[in-house]
Amino acid sequence: MTSETDNLSVVVHAAGDLRLENRPVPEPGPNDVLLRMHSVGICGSDVHYWEHGRIGDFIVQKPMVLGHEASGTVVKVGTAVKHLKTGDRVAVEPGVPRELDEFCKAGRYNLSPTIFFCATPPDDGNLCRYYVHNANYCYKLPDNVTFEEGALIEPLSVGIHACRRGGVTLGSKVFICGAGPIGLVTLLIAKCMGASQVIISDLSALRLEKARELGADFILKVEGEKPQELAKKVTEYLGCMPEITIECTGAEACIQTGIYATRSGGTLVLVGMGPALVNIPIVNASVREVDIKGIFRYCNTWPMAIAMLASKKVDVRPLVTHRFNLEQALEAFETTKKGLGIKVMMKCEKHNKNP
């Protein structure tokens, strides 16, 4: 079925050193499945590891396969796996708890300090032909959900988790900072969860036009305004201050804007990862009782995301603007680095660019 030369993989060795390598096809353990990968999206974190060799305390110290936004087909199942079989199409949740600790028991396994996570040192990702993953974190895709939609469940899950943490519900008025891939999926989820009005800001006119296409009620191009000035514009567009702000850039000025913009008693959700330390108007948030919440990835989101995609309540397909075969990985990473389009999708099966 496979041979050692079949498993072409995208591997980062150190900052600036990205290679295509053939690796042995792995064997699944009792609780695992071997997947033939189909679609893997390139995330900003993949590019960051390539450019810098690290993200915060996560440092590439040995060659690491990139990729964590993924879907594929089961080609072999472990002896203890009962819910999947050869031929099943699945979406991969990249974070797998290594032990049943207090966070897992509380249903917040994403906070477990021992979690395995694809393409986070020292763990390999799945931007390759064949990949082994824990079967409990592989979710069968309905026939009407494509592989690409399955791969996009990972970023979609960030939007679900952010909107849950923010308390988005029927009638909510929401401000989203940043119209990159995460900001756009957050927009889709906020509208699906019942937000009556969503305003989204960004530096890029092209990304804001995409946000308009995806259902944003208002778009706001950032022109270098000070945070308080930008917050005032948000209020002018909405006719009131938003109850919920979801910050998807990590930029200090955007976090400041988020605090100033959010209605008293409202919630600011921090999604974007920026500098370790930022200056924020904490007294302003305190005296107005603006709750500041962080998120770390997601948990318990794949079933909801699959249901949304299968029911066609959410359409993520317009997010994919570029497709590359695995052999074109370097070109694909350069495209992502340059900020061209929205989502770059890698096709891991030979000679296959189908969704």
Image: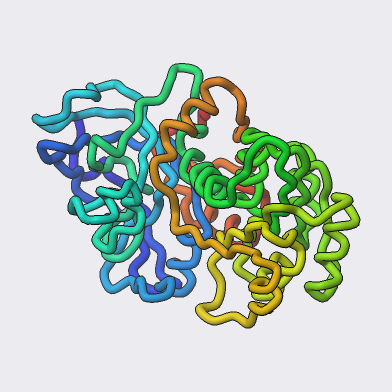
Q: Is residue 149 above or below residue 160?
A: above
- Who's the residue at 80% across and 46% down the image? 209
The answer to whether any part of residue 290 appears in the image is yes
| Residue 299 image position (x, y, % from top left) | 40, 46
Image coords of residue 19 (percent x, y): 38, 61
- Between residues 307 and 152, which one lies in front from this camera angle? 307
Instruction: Tell me residue 178's x, y (percent).
Output: 69, 58
Q: Quadrant of residue 176?
A: bottom right
Q: What residue is rendered at 65% in x and 41% in y?
A: 190
The structure residue drawn at horizontal position 50% and vertical position 47%, both measured from the top left corner, is 161
Q: Nearer the viewer, residue 158 or 33?
A: 158
| Residue farthest toward the top in the current orientation of the protein | 143
Quadrant the N terminus occupies = top left
Picture residue at 36% right of the left edge, 39% below the top: 92
Q: Is residue 47 above or below residue 92?
A: below
Query: Picture quarter containing residue 15?
Result: bottom left
